[in-house]
Image: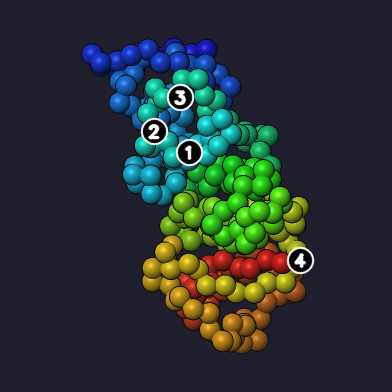
Amino acid sequence: MTKSLSAESKDAIPVTLTVNGRKHDLRIDPRTSLLDCLREHLHLTGTKKGCDHEQCGTCTVLINGRRINSCLTLAVMHQDDDIVTIEGLGSPGALHPMQAAFVECDGFQCGYCTPGQICSAVSMLAEVKAGWPSHATADVASARIALTDAEIREPMSGNICRCAAYPNIVAFQLSREKRLSPRRAPKRSLLPLSPRRHPGSPNTTPANSVWPSPELAQPAEASPAQEYRLRLKQPHATAWLFPSWSD
């Protein structure tokens, strides 16, 4: 258990939070967001501040196993909850399986959104296993939800990656769930990115959505990162930020 009296104001109240398995006794302003409490009072800076308006998903943490944007929820609301941040999922010497898959599939570039992406992905896979349908679920009455591209993209659409590392973000979740090696090259087709995620992207799939020339042909053994770099050489590359995976 740790105690903190930092940044105490005249309106500060005692608050006890359980974060990553440890109890913390704090005195904070009741208007303090959970995000600011984690970063400024507990110095857990793995959780990032992006938009501060619940729009980008950068601040995602787990509350009782479910993902939540920590920027627009008050810390005092979670005194009886189990809070897990990216620091609580794993450590450099003992990575969480999702963290390991993320690194193996090269699912990041600048890394700023990475903690939120990983926390959200952990919860998203738990939702799929529990049979929770999403907007992309074809049969909401089905007891088992198939993990498809759409079932990853739609529930993860609240986590924005400005570096556009989406193909490998899809790949690392499939690698984690289906135990696919990132070096294996299953059959893929190209699907357009939803325009609500990237408004400037084309909204339709061209009739000929194959590799345009021999020099850009898909290699027999291609990692997601190699495939993504090849796709960037194609015209209108931003339309193909998500591959479609099938066994």
Q: Pointer 2 and pointer 1: residues touching (CB < 8 Å)?
A: yes
From the image, tell me which residue sits under label 3.
78
Q: Is residue 102 left or right of residue 221?
A: left
The disc, 1 or 3, on the residue closer to the chain's N-terminal end is 1
Q: Pointer 2 and pointer 3: residues touching (CB < 8 Å)?
A: yes
Task: Find numbered disc 3 in the image and state the secondary structure of the residue it sits on.
Answer: helix
Residue type marked 3: His
**Cα–Cα span, label 3 and label 4:** 42 Å
Residue type marked 2: Thr
The disc, 2 or 3, on the residue closer to the chain's N-terminal end is 2
From the image, tell me which residue sits under label 4.
247
Q: Is residue 218 left or right of residue 11?
A: right
Task: Find numbered disc 2 in the image and state the secondary structure of the residue it sits on.
Answer: loop
Mark drawn on residue 68: 1
Q: Nearer the viewer, mark 3 or mark 4?
A: 3
**Cα–Cα span, label 2 and label 1:** 9 Å
Mark drawn on residue 181: none
Q: Residue at x 45, y 75 (%)?
A: 203
